[in-house]
Image (cartoon, grey):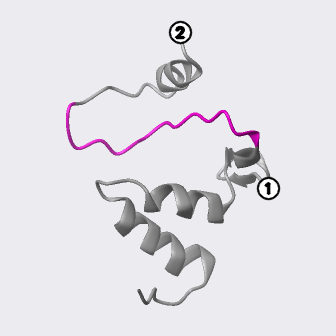
Amino acid sequence: MQRSSYLAQALDLKKTDSGANVHILTSCDRGVFDYLEVVEGGLSSCPVQLFLNLQRDPARGQEAAEQLWQIRLFDCPISV
């Protein structure tokens, strides 16, 4: 079983065909674990890494990235 499957099971997540709210990504690049942050008792990648990952998500990643930018990174609107 993959690590992501263990995590999904531990969090009692259910797989769906659409409308997913959780994405579990794994990486072979150990650099994504640089500058980990503790968020509500759990580990998260640094906000910049998370922003970059969200930017690549075709579903609602852009929307989530903009929220992260405004709330966590710079507290100002993105101008593209």
Q: Secondary structure at mark 2?
A: loop
Residue 34 located left or right of residue 61: right
Is residue 28 a member of the stretch shown in magenta?
yes
Magenta-drawn stretch, dominant element (helix, strand or loop): loop
Residue 32 located left or right of residue 58: right
Residue under label 2: 1
**Residue 3 in the image: x percent, y percent?**
59, 21
For the point 38% across and 53% down, the residue is 57
Upstream in the sequence, badge 1 or badge 2? 2
**Residue 64 in the image: x percent, y percent?**
41, 64
Residue 67: assigned label: none
Mark 1–mark 2 distance (CA, rounded to whole Å)? 27 Å
Residue 35: assigned label: 1
Q: Quadrant of residue 50?
A: bottom right
Q: Quadrant of the C terminus?
A: bottom left
Q: Is residue 12 above or below residue 31?
A: above
Q: Is residue 35 above or below residue 42?
A: below
Which residue type does callout 2 highlight? Answer: Met
Residue 53 located left or right of residue 12: right
Residue placed furthest toward the left = 18
Q: Quadrant of residue 17?
A: top left
**Residue 74 in the image: x percent, y percent?**
61, 84
Q: Secondary structure at mark 1?
A: loop
> Which region of the structure is painted magenta?
17-30
Q: Is residue 57 above or below residue 14?
A: below
Q: Nearer the viewer, residue 20 or 13?
A: 20
For the point 45% across and 67% down, the residue is 65
Is residue 20 a member of the stretch shown in magenta?
yes
Residue placed furthest toward the top = 1
For label 2, count other residues whose C-alpha is less than 10 Å away and answer few (under 14), some (14-19) or many (20+): few
For the point 46% across and 58% down, the residue is 54
Which residue type does callout 1 highlight? Answer: Tyr
